[in-house]
Image: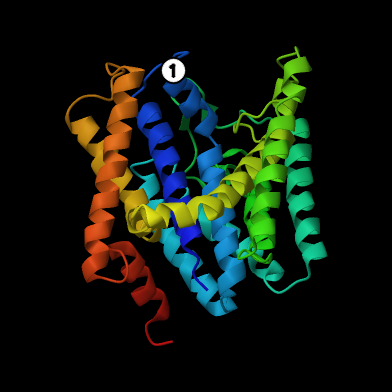
Amino acid sequence: MRLQALDIARFLAFCGMVLVNFRLAANVTPGDDWFSVLTNVLEGRSAALFVVLAGVGIALAKPQTDLFLRRAAFLFVLGLANSIVFDADILHFYALYFIAAIPFVTTENRWLWLGISSFMVISLIAQVTLDYDVGWNWITNQYSDFWTLKGFLRHSFYNGWHPVFPWVSFLLFGMWIGRQDLSASVIHNRMIVWGSIFAAVAVIPGWFVQDPELLYLADTNSVPPGPFYLIASSGSAVAVIGLVFKIEPTLSHLGLTQWLTAPGRLALTLYVAHIYLGIGILDELGRLDGSLSQLQIFVISLIFCAACSLYARLWRIHFKRGPLETLMRWVTEKGH
């Protein structure tokens, strides 16, 4: 079953990721204007929405374990290659999430929730008892020993950009959402209401903690991913998905559906493109030196997203899948 609202939500997550990554890559100092605040809010939440949507897709597709593993291997190799250029790559993390999720694909919901809570608790214990800063240069955002076995494992499972503990919780949460009746309006309403409540309430504890050594346990920043970040991002993700389901008929009536679903179905291709074309062009122009203003990088990000929508819409007229989506399917399903 393919639901158009999920593709639209995936494109929105992509746009949020572009806004965040373009600003980070361009070394732009955030301001206090509304577009700076919006980008601040999206940091960590857009990627979380992507992972939640991946979980929804798994629940709907119910892929066979061998296909799951082959796709994980493809993403792992692609992600490592991408990491040579882009330190904050998420694709190789997806591979690890998929492997971790295999035991939960056919389990009852109670086991899903046990998995969600377990990944969260183990992550929290590790953050409290271990040195989270090891390997990091927070001035340059470089991870010194990523390409060593010890550093890679630490980065992948504990203190990288999107570590398995606790990010698999987002994937499992998405799998639980995917098991709901997503065609029912009452479900959409619940997603919007309860998602918004959890996203809002999770912000409150950070208001009352003054000790900087303890703030990471109470705030909603994505690094390190504390418990309230996980709650806030899960809440905002489910609220966005519910809202998109709610407004999708209106978008269809306005003739916007194909322009929003097409890029959502080419998310893998566009993710790589935003690094090598988007950030790459800015690099070639010498604009990753902090010389752009927050407004300029915001507008550039939106123009890039609009260009991606146009490209995807034209591509989908002639081809069913995007270039990298086709390659993944060919590599992982050939001869099977």
Q: Quadrant of residue 41?
A: top right
Q: Where does residue 253 sit, x and y in percent of width and height?
A: 39, 56
Using the image as rendered, state which of residue 80 and residue 201 is in the foreground: 201
Can you name the residue that lies furthest to the left here? 285
Q: Amino acid at mark 1?
A: Pro
Name the quarter where the C terminus is drawn.
bottom left
Q: Is residue 210 left or right of residue 327?
A: right
Residue at 78% x, 57% y: name it. Answer: 113
From the viewer's side, name the closer residue of 207 and 6: 6
Residue 111 in the image, given as x and y percentages of width and height: 80, 64
Please, what secondary structure does the residue beneath circle 1 have?
Answer: loop
Residue 124 to residue 71: above or below: above
Q: Taking 110 as reference, is 232 above or below it? A: above
Residue tagged by mark 1? 30
Residue at screen point 47% across, 57% down: 249
Which residue is depicted at the point 46% across and 20% down? 34
Quadrant in which residue 332 is drawn: bottom left
**Percent x, y of residue 262:** 34, 59
Q: Mark 1 Cα within 10 Å, few/some/many (few <14, many 20+)?
A: some
Side of 241 where 250 appears, left or right: left
Along the line of sight, which residue is nearer the eye, 258 or 318? 258
How are the colours assigned in the image?
A: rainbow
Q: Residue at horizontal 67%, vertical 46%?
A: 166
> Can residue 87 be seen from the camera position used here?
no
Q: Residue furthest bottom?
A: 335
Q: Is residue 121 visible?
A: yes
Question: Eyeballing the image, is 23 above or below 47?
Answer: above
Q: Position of residue 99 (x, y in %)?
A: 60, 64
136 lies left or right of 298: right
